[in-house]
Amino acid sequence: MKNRLTELYLVSLAILTMGIFESTTEGFYSGVIKLSVGAIFLVFAITSHVKYNINRKQLERELSKEYDERDDVIEGKAAHVTLKILMIAIFLMMFLSKWIAIPTNTALFIMLLFSSMISVLAKKYYNHVL
């Protein structure tokens, strides 16, 4: 579409310049006709360009709305999976802490690693599935 608009601008400007040169050198009436045809083409090119931009912006808004809804679904499902796995890891750490001494910093670091890895993997999975 952009090529078509560029071609319309170039054709209208070419007809306008031909009309200007013809009206000053050869024939006044044929130059005026070419100037008016070039002006009509230029107005048509400008209106087409404006309509194209308006339609493109409206289409981008609609697509971004669908994309936002899809992102929300992916974020929700990934958060749900991350929360489930994080709860399992916490229960496992609580169970293991009865027999093994686990420092608090190490336990928190393991939880952070679990949650970040699971969140990223769940987002990739749901992005691929949905």
Image (spheres, helix red, strand yellow):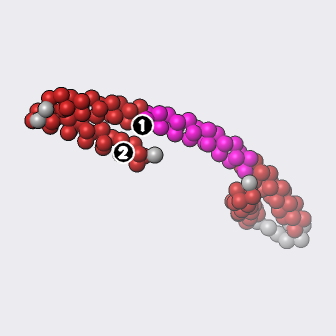
Amino acid type at circle 2 is: Thr
The prevailing secondary structure element of the residues shown in magenta is helix
Q: Position of residue 67 (x, y in %)?
A: 65, 45
Left or right of 45, for residue 106: right
Q: Tell me, yes or no, whether the highlighted magenta stretch contains residue 9.
A: no
Taking the spot 30% from the left edge, 43% from the top edge, the residue there is 10
Indicate the secondary structure of the residue bearing disc 2.
helix
Taking the spot 62% from the left edge, 38% from the top edge, the residue there is 62
Residue sitting nearer the eye, 60 or 37? 37
Q: Tell me, yes or no, whether the highlighted magenta stretch contains residue 54.
A: yes
Left or right of 48, for residue 96: right
Looking at this rendering, what residue extends furthest in the bottom direction?
100
User: Neighbour class for label 1 at 10 Å: few (<14), some, many (≥20)?
Assistant: some
Q: Quadrant of the C terminus?
A: bottom right
Q: Which range of residues does the magenta coloring cover?
A: 48-74
The number of callouts visible is: 2
Residue tagged 2: 6
Residue sitting nearer the eye, 42 or 55? 42
Left or right of 85, for residue 11: left
Quarter of the image holding residue 4? top left
Residue tagged 1: 49
Looking at the image, is mark 2 or mark 1 earlier in the sequence? 2
Amino acid type at circle 1 is: His
Whether residue 46 is visible here, answered yes or no, is: no
Taking the spot 72% from the left edge, 49% from the top edge, the residue there is 75
Looking at this rendering, what residue extends furthest in the left direction?
25
